[in-house]
Image (cartoon, rainbow, N blue to C red):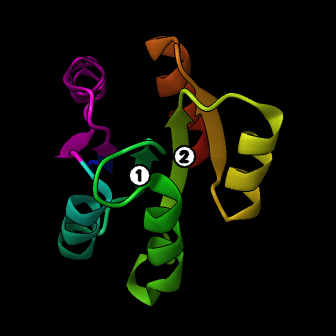
Amino acid sequence: MQKKILIVDDEPNIVMSLEYAFKKKDFEVFIARDGTEALDISNREKPDLILLDIMMPEMDGYETLKRVRDNIDLSHTKVVFLSAKSKEKDVEKGLKMGADSYMTKPFSIKKVISDIEDLLG
C-alpha cells in the first residue's frame, strides 16, 4: 500500500522538487502551503508522515505540530520538521514539541527521502 506524505511549505520550488522525488518513490503526495491547509488535509487523508516547514504564513509549523499531536486521529502520523531554522535551540524545541525528526535547509533530496523511508520502516 502506498504511504501518504503531506509536504507543508510555502516555497513552491521546495514543494515541487520534493513532490516529484516522493512520487518517483511511489508515495501518495499531498501539498499544503500553510498550517491551516495542512490540518484540513491531515484530517481528511490521515497521512503517514508530515514534512513540515516552521516559518509559514497563517499558522507556523510549531502550532501545526501541536494541533497534530493533540488530534487522536493523527496519533500514528510521524512529523518531520524541514526548516531553515538550524540553530541548536530551534532543533531542540522542535524535537521537544514532539517532532519525530528535524532536518535543516538547504537539504539533500536523497537524504530527506532515505531518512523518511527509514522513519516509516
Identify the mark nearer the N-term, 2 or 1: 1
Helix, strand or loop status at disc 1: strand
Q: Which residue is mark 2?
A: 80
**Is 4 placed left or right of 68 in the picture?**
left
For residue 99, the mark is: none
Residue sitting at x 51%, y 25%: 112
- How many marks overall? 2
Q: Which residue is mark 1?
A: 50
Range drawn in magenta = 7-33
Crowding at mark 2 (Cα within 10 Å: few <14, some 14-19, many 20+): many
Where residue 73 sits in the image (x, y, percent)? 39, 84
- The answer to whether marks 2 and 1 mark residues whose Cβ atoms lie closer than 8 Å is yes
Q: Amino acid at mark 2?
A: Val
**Is 68 placed left or right of 9 in the picture?**
right
**Is 95 placed left or right of 64 in the picture?**
right
CA gap between label 2 and label 1 equals 6 Å
The reply to whether residue 121 is in sight is no
